[in-house]
Amino acid sequence: MRRGRQDLPGRDAGSRAASEPLDRGIVIALRRLPALAHRLLPSEGPDASSSQSACGHPPSAAVTKELHELLARVRVYLDQFTDLSPEGSVAASAVLEDGAVRVAWLQVVAVAVRWPLTVPSSGSRSEGSGSGGGSSGSPGSRSSRSGSGNGASGTSGNQGSRRRGDSTPEAAALLAQEACDTTGVLLHLMSMQPPPSAAALDFVRKLLRMQTLQCLARRFAEAPADAGSLTAQQHELAAYYAEFLSSTVRAVTMFSTSSHPDQRPLVCLCRQLAEALLDSSVVEHLARLLLLLLLRVPTCGMDTTRCMAVLTFKACQNIFTLLSKQGGDQAACAALRQVLSGRCLRHFVLVHGVAALCGADGGPTYGLPDAVRQAAFGGCMVAASPGRSLQLEPALVYSLNAMLSIDVPLTPVGTRVAVSMLLRFGRLLVASSGGGWAAQQPELRSVSLPAQPAGPRVVVPLAELAQCAMCVLPPTINLLCPLLAVGGSEWVAEAGADCWRLVVAVVSRSFLRWSKPSHRAWLGSHLLLDWVLHFLPGEPLPSAALPLVTAFLAGGALPCVERLLRRAGEEPLGPESDAVKAMHRCERSWQLWCLLLAYGEPRQGAALVATVGKLLRRVGTGAEAERASSLTDCAGSVLSRALETPAAPEQVQALPEQLARQLMRAVCEWLPELSRIALQLMAAPVAPGSADEPARACNVLAPLLTWLPLLLLRCGVGGGVGGATAGKATAGAADAAGPASCAADDLRLLLLAEVGAVRLLGGALRLAQHSTTSYQMRHCLAESCCLVAAMWPGAVRRATCANAAGVELQASRRDGGSDGSTSKGAAAVASPQSSPPPAPSFSSAWPPALLRALVPHLRTERAEQVADGVLALAELLEAGDVGGGGSSSGGCDNQQVPQ
């Protein structure tokens, strides 16, 4: 679109101009605006809604010319600030600061938008002068709106404009163009640095209130059915009107999307725009005009038509952005949704979408006539240098997303066509990214496409790849998921697999490298996880994969997730890290892992488990542990939440057999590392009043305490206090783990040596005193203590004795070796010159007092059996007879404490 930016002063000039609110010459010029605007208005006081009055008593040529020059001077001045966001916003607000200037500017705009698009014949003064000269050149003294020349631009056009400027109606048309253009620049600058100033907000509010959009709609509707009769001047004026409309919508969108719900003026402004768009149908009239122009003989104005199409795409994009933002304002949302549902607008966007796809891949045209397709193709492309591939206009993709994301009922054929178009756009995005994935991307199996030549004919700009993917793939998933959920036809399954192949390609390195970190995070969290929302937590998992999961796996999702995790671990600063971190931060990422492990290829599932185990082994302490907290939380949620899945009616056990086997593999790989991380977190010093470290330790401990009772029961623990009290509480959960993949002896070795159950529970008893510990965690801790004491009474007793010996040794060192009971070796180590060694943050011992502290919480939740068992265990610890073997093995006197 012509923005008049070709002859801008340098950035230095803009910086100097920004040092003051306004240039003195501009201030003087603006002081003349109210008087000129008053002379511009008809003396009879015309009806504001009557276009006839706007041209029936045209102002004098001198007034029109002076206003034109004044506005042009202001526009050239404002053009300096287009790349300076804060300075541009300040300058635009300064222009409108004076109330009289604001009113005068609005008066000029009111006349401009009421100037008829079709210039009347020269036979009547009341209808203006003739239009014969309108086709001889450009209507303005500046270049065409697209920035490239055509038959209606250039030097001859400028000369023709000066000749036509002597005619009052044509001078008024030029003034209308300049008023729309300068006001568009003003709105653009005001929207660069929201929130708007009070003056800017008042200007936009009054701009909408004086029926500006309704007048623009009348101008677009004035185009005759035979759009070929539009002169170059009329065509150019329509383009200025379209740019003014797009700037207005963009300004309100920027104001509203950056506002807070409590900012009522901006919320009301959004509703006012929505009502004006719906009442005027201005976007619908603009789309109708452009559809008519597609059939025009391409003798002139093609660049202008293309720029008008791009402006319409951008208006759709901004309206959809506004719709997404105004979730709480039902009235505004309903109006905006109805605007985007207009038939002319939807047809216009879809026609250009089909034209772009046919030019890119040569695929089906869906019945679009060749003449219309060829005419629309130019409006989809960005001008490219010779020898390079044509670039797709990104605004088309955004507007297509707007058309397909609103709740407009589609017929089965319409749904299939929409899915087909979106898949083709996704394929174009992948091909545009380059790299290995683009070269290896298989053909879409659900869409019949001709063989591709070497290299794509049309590409999407690299800077827009991620944003376009965020617009294309989500509506594709939303259209396919309901069809897959009910087990659609064969093409639905093929289209679902095609969709997930595109998702896998989009989250590959060759694509992510062109994306911003925020876009990578969105791709990792939404594309891979949004479809999981169709599975509610707590629902049983069927024994066979549902069609939705089958399509997801057929697209290569399981190796994709494993590759993302592995590369993020290998290169923490690589492009995959942003996607993985965002995926782990999502609350339901564990459900994705469970579905992959339950129904994916077993060897690929085992590779995923092994990769997560390697990542957990790399987790250290301090800031590194904090960064990896999302990984540990996700792994822990997989282990914990999978056990909560109920059994389907046709299943004997809750979990599918494959998921049970993979979970046992994950237990052996992950529990030792989670235990190590938990011990490190519990040993770390805690700042007074801080709850971060205890809360993080609780999150890591939760899956350990959930699985310890299950695994101990599967090891055959029984008898004693622990087996008697915990058996009833966990007997059902033990069956939920499915068939054992490890022998009982291996499990015992895993829990005692690798997990370090005794030491882990000793630290957990101390952590349980913190307020962040939940009842469920205390309950699992009590059961685990009882079962571990029943399984390894000697280990518990040795830990208690070692702790007692350590306390005595430290006491003797503090006494300086004066006690006769202190050994000579110990006295020699504790010399007066050496400082005493720091005491451990916690020991492996189970203090009976901490066990007793669990009892009130257990009794509050009526866990009487577990509470009785904990009390009995505390009494045995105090007596030194954990195993119940009497004096032959009780106490610490008979235990050899390792030094």
Image (cartoon, helix red, strand yellow):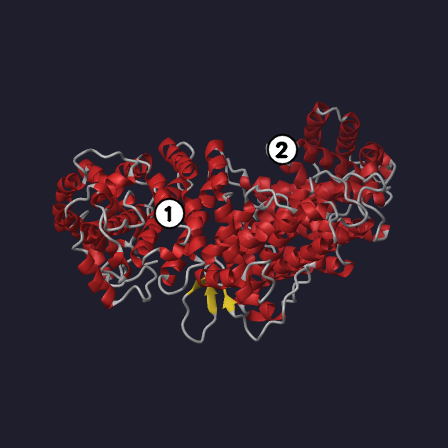
Q: Element type at marker 2?
A: loop
Locate residue 355 relative to residue 701 in the image: left or right: left
Q: Quadrant of residue 266?
A: top left
Is residue 574 in view from this perspective?
no
Give the x, y percent position of residue 304. 36, 59
- CA distance separating discs 2 and 1: 73 Å
| Mark 2 vs mark 1: in front | 1
Q: Element type at marker 1?
A: helix
Give the x, y percent position of residue 60. 14, 46
Q: Viewer-proximal residue, 650 or 653?
A: 650
Locate residue 550 relative to residue 344 in the image: left or right: right
Type of residue at label 1? Phe
Q: Which residue is mark 1?
A: 220
Image height of 725 relative to 463, above or below:
above
| Mark 1: few/some/many CA within 10 Å (<14, 14-19, 20+) | many
For the point 37% across and 43% down, the residue is 217
In the picture, the quarter occupied by the N terminus is: bottom left
Locate residue 529 relative to residue 29 in the image: left or right: right
Q: Which residue is mark 2?
A: 769
Give the x, y percent position of residue 489. 74, 52
Q: Viewer-proximal residue, 176 or 695?
A: 176
Q: Residue furthest front?
A: 123
Q: Which badge, 2 or 1, is on the more N-terminal residue?
A: 1
Locate residue 114 relative to residue 451 in the image: left or right: left
